[in-house]
């Protein structure tokens, strides 16, 4: 089958790889209809992780079941399904408590597994024609048959639940003000989720105009950090007060003010967003941090950044009594509810999707998404 294979920093290729096989009676094989490119893929694409050449990318996958193992109970050939990017068993202690992003079964020696991701276990990615799904009864979320809401549903694999998770970690509640750092797909979904949860005012901070325009389209207030410190811009609008809640949807590859927007070229300040969030959130407020931070970054800007150690204004955080939550999204906690909001037409997250292309165009799509040019905000690949 065809698959998107990582070759070296800034290069992927569409190559022929082995077809996946049922390896356990509770596996299914899914014929992929949509697989999205994620900002998390870019960390690997840019060589900013330990990902080795040869890995097949793709953790945001949906499709139709092609084959079922003999022990699969609730799924049949022909069912339309979307899989959380987390691979999870459903029965370990963490899964039992809803922390499916920290499953201890699927990636021995580590808490957490994913498809097509470095250090996340042996699970081959779905930017391909077919994909093996283990513990399939647990990992497949059934969808209505047909092709309605394809783009909306594909976002249930990661970014819609992950954005929602950011809002949940910050406990965004009706009437609150929220600052969302990053208007990439995750930030836009965090802003959208904040709106769904009843926030009164949502600020979206970025410096890519097309992304800020998308934020404005859902009623958020765009803040361009190239125009000046975003904390001061928000304080100016809010008569000197900060906001109730903050969400970091940028992560460790945060760009300096005025530097390039392109992923491989920007000047980075890995702690800038965390410290700005500590600055802008009001005392007793909360911060959700779905943005990715890594314990090992070969391209880190200095020695401490290379080991994920960042300088934080912890004194300010203490003084203000702020609380924070971070980590992988436990997609399974939210995906069925968010699916039902889509079916009820109360949520249409696909406003973030800018491009839908054939898998053959993946190399070009990766380049443009990484460069953040031509409006490339969220790309769906169709095998
Ligand atoms: N926790 C999880 O489970 C999970 C899941 C998916 C993605 N992620 C992570 O979430 C982050 C966002 O993902 P994405 O797909 O939206 O990525 P993305 O790279 O498309 O978006 C990041 C955005 O942040 C903006 N940005 C850069 N520096 C900034 C700064 N100083 N202030 C404000 N904005 C800034 C960029 O211009 C870009 O638009 C990534 O780190 C990704 O790895 C985490
Ligand atoms: Zn993703
Ligand atoms: Zn588990």
Image (cartoon, helix red, strand yellow):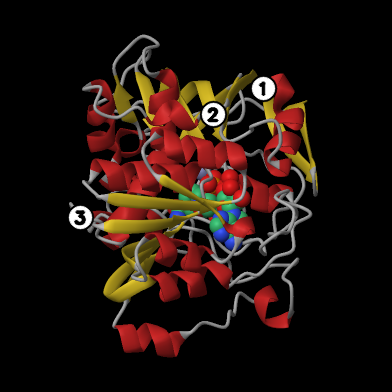
Q: Nearer the viewer, residue 283 or 165?
A: 283
The answer, for residue 122, to whether it is visible in the render is no
Give the number of marks.
3
The answer, for residue 177, to whether it is visible in the render is yes
Q: For the residue carrying disc 1, how many other residues have a C-alpha within 10 Å: few (<14), some (14-19), or many (20+)?
A: many
Cα–Cα gap, marks 2 and 3: 32 Å
Q: Kindly identify the residue that appears in the image at 28 percent across and 71 percent down.
A: 285
Q: Is mark 3 within 8 Å of ligand 1?
A: no
* Residue at the spot of label 2: 35
Cα–Cα gap, marks 1 and 2: 9 Å
Q: Kindly identify the residue that appears in the image at 40 percent across and 11 percent down.
A: 147
* Residue at the spot of label 1: 359
Q: Secondary structure at mark 2?
A: strand
Q: Nearer the viewer, residue 1 or 147?
A: 147
Label whose residue precedes the other's in the sequence (1 or 2): 2
Q: Secondary structure at mark 1?
A: helix
Q: Secondary structure at mark 3?
A: loop
Q: Which mark is residue 173?
A: 3
Label whose residue precedes the other's in the sequence (3 or 1): 3
């Amino acid at each position: 089958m065809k698959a998107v294979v990582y070759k070296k920093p800034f290069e992927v290729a569409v190559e022929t790889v082995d077809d996946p096989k049922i390896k356990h009676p509770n596996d299914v094989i899914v014929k992929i209809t949509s697989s999205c490119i994620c900002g998390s893929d870019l960390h690997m694409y840019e060589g900013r992780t330990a990902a080795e050449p040869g890995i097949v990318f793709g953790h945001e996958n949906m499709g139709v079941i092609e084959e079922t193992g003999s022990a699969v109970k609730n799924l049949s050939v022909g069912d339309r399904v979307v899989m959380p990017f987390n691979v999870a068993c459903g029965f370990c202690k963490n899964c039992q408590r809803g922390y499916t992003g920290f499953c201890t079964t699927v990636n021995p020696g580590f808490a957490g597994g994913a498809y097509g991701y470095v250090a996340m276990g042996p699970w081959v990615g779905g930017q391909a024609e077919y994909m093996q799904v283990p513990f399939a009864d647990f990992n497949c979320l059934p969808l209505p048959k047909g092709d309605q809401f394809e783009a909306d549903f594909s976002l249930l694999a990661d970014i819609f639940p992950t954005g929602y998770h950011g809002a949940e970690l910050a406990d965004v509640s009706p009437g609150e003000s929220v600052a969302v750092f990053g208007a990439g797909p995750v930030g836009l979904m965090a802003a959208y989720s904040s709106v769904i949860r009843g926030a009164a005012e949502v600020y979206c901070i970025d410096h890519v105009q097309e992304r800020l325009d998308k934020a404005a389209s859902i009623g958020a207030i765009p803040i361009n950090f190239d125009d000046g410190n975003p904390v001061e811009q928000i304080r100016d609008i809010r008569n000197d007060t900060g906001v109730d809640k903050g969400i970091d949807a940028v992560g460790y590859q945060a760009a300096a003010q005025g530097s390039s927007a392109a992923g491989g070229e920007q000047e980075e300040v890995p702690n800038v967003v965390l410290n700005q969030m500590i600055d802008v959130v009001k005392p007793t407020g909360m911060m959700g941090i779905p943005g990715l931070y890594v314990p090992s970054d070969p391209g880190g800007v200095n020695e401490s950044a290379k080991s994920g150690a960042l300088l934080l204004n912890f004194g300010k955080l203490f003084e203000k009594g702020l609380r924070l939550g971070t980590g992988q999204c436990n997609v399974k906690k939210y995906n069925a509810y968010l699916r039902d909001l889509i079916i009820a037409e109360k949520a249409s997250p696909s406003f973030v999707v800018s491009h839908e292309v054939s898998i053959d165009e993946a190399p070009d799509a990766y380049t443009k998404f990484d460069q953040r040019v031509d409006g490339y905000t969220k790309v769906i690949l169709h095998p």
